[in-house]
Amino acid sequence: EAEAGFWRCRESCASARLVGERDTQRRQSRGDRAERGPTPTMSLAFDEYGRPFIVIKDAESKKRIKGLEAQKANILAARTVARILRSSLGPKGMDKMLQSPDGELTISNDGATILEQMEVENQIGKLLVELSRSQDHEIGDGTTGVVVLAGSLLEQAEVLLDRGMHPIRVAEGFEMAAKIAHKTLDSISEEFNFSADNLDPLINTCMTTLSSKIVNRCKRDMAEYCVKAVMAVADLERRDVNLDLIKVEGKVGGSIEDTSLVYGIVIDKDMSHPQMPKNIEDAKIAILTCPFEPPKPKTKHKVDIDTVEKYEKLHETEQKYFTDMIQQCKDSGANLIICQWGFDDEANHLLYKNDL
């Protein structure tokens, strides 16, 4: 009994010590919480339409600008973009070297290309990028000039805003100025006539647009190629040109002087057999939409060949299939076969033997 009482006393002392430690820990954690302040709780505030209020991080360091300050900030952004392009304007304009995030280099003095590659964050800057893109899409030239002109107009508008003029009045003034400019251009412009036989006026016009491009050292040849290509597909009665009918193919190696104009179709393919002739004059072409190989069943198949006779029979069947196809091509009078899918090795050999 004495031992049992002693153990019970030790257990109660241990439990009392444990409870005492827990109380101390609770008091300490309560004191820490009191020092730290109340635990933050996440709550969203909504307006009467159910839209949440957005609290901006570091709101005290940010401020909303409006009125003249906002207009000046927008004008500054546009002027900055225009200033970047100003040095690449005209025949003496310098090229810009741009590096993409993955390390690819682009060298160009074309306004639309430079603005496409630039990562413009400002909204007004993005508007100028759109302006350059639409100019490129509609006219195809003057992408740099239109941005520089917009930047200069905004620069002049800033002077008028400083004098206390309302932005709407400035915009109206620009619209009136544009109408006067149109009238002046109509009065000083000259009409020149061209025909399919006399292309010089068009070539001279084309050469002026190539003066600031990288091909300016052989701009006469390039201008002739461009004009001849357009005249080949132009509908002069309707005064319409479908530019989708003109394709520009770039080839690595060689120089700009090696450029040539092809009236027809360029198919960038090699002959399927290395010993086939590379030049064929007055070729008659057969275009096949079926594969030049033995037919294959759609489902999974397995052929067991256990004798030489069976293998030879299979080979004869394949040969007969190819011979029939080649005979059909020869009967059509073609001497060049173009296939959508490709040629079997056996077919290549037989085509070469049959001078196809």
Image: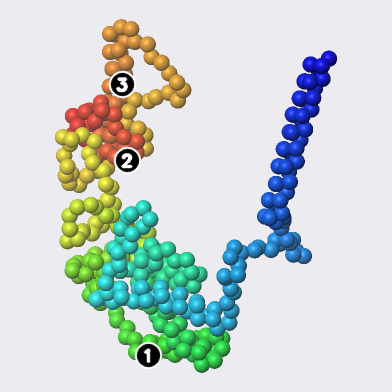
Quick one: quadrant of the C terminus?
top left
Amino acid type, mark 1 = Ser
Disc number lying in front (3 or 1): 1
Disc number lying in front (2 or 1): 1
Q: Residue at x 36, y 53 (%)?
A: 102
Q: Residue at x 32, y 10 (%)?
A: 310
The residue to which callout 1 is attached is 187
Distance CA(mark 2)–CA(mark 3) = 22 Å
Q: Position of residue 174 (x, y in %)?
A: 48, 86
Residue most extreme to the front = 2
Distance CA(mark 3)–CA(mark 1) = 77 Å
Mark 3: which secondary structure?
helix
- Dot 3 surroundings within 10 Å: few (below 14), some, or many (20 or more)? some
Mark 2: which secondary structure?
strand
The reply to whether residue 34 is in sight is yes
The reply to whether residue 327 is in sight is no
Q: Residue at x 28, y 17 (%)?
A: 316
Q: Can you say whether 249 is above or below 130 in the image?
A: above
Q: Can you say whether 41 is above or below 66 in the image?
A: above
Amino acid type, mark 3 = Glu
Mark 1: which secondary structure?
helix
The residue to which callout 2 is attached is 287
Residue nearest the viewer, comparing 33 with 319? 33
Q: Quadrant of residue 242?
A: bottom left
Task: Kindly indicate whether the residue at mark 3 contacts the one at mark 2 (C-beta within 8 angstroms).
Answer: no
Distance CA(mark 2)–CA(mark 1) = 56 Å
Q: Residue at x 18, y 35 (%)?
A: 274
Mark 2 and mark 3 lie on one chain; the one further toward the N terminus is 2
Q: Position of residue 298 (x, y in %)?
A: 45, 25
Mark 3 and mark 1 lie on one chain; the one further toward the N terminus is 1
The residue to which callout 3 is attached is 318
Mark 2 and mark 1 lie on one chain; the one further toward the N terminus is 1
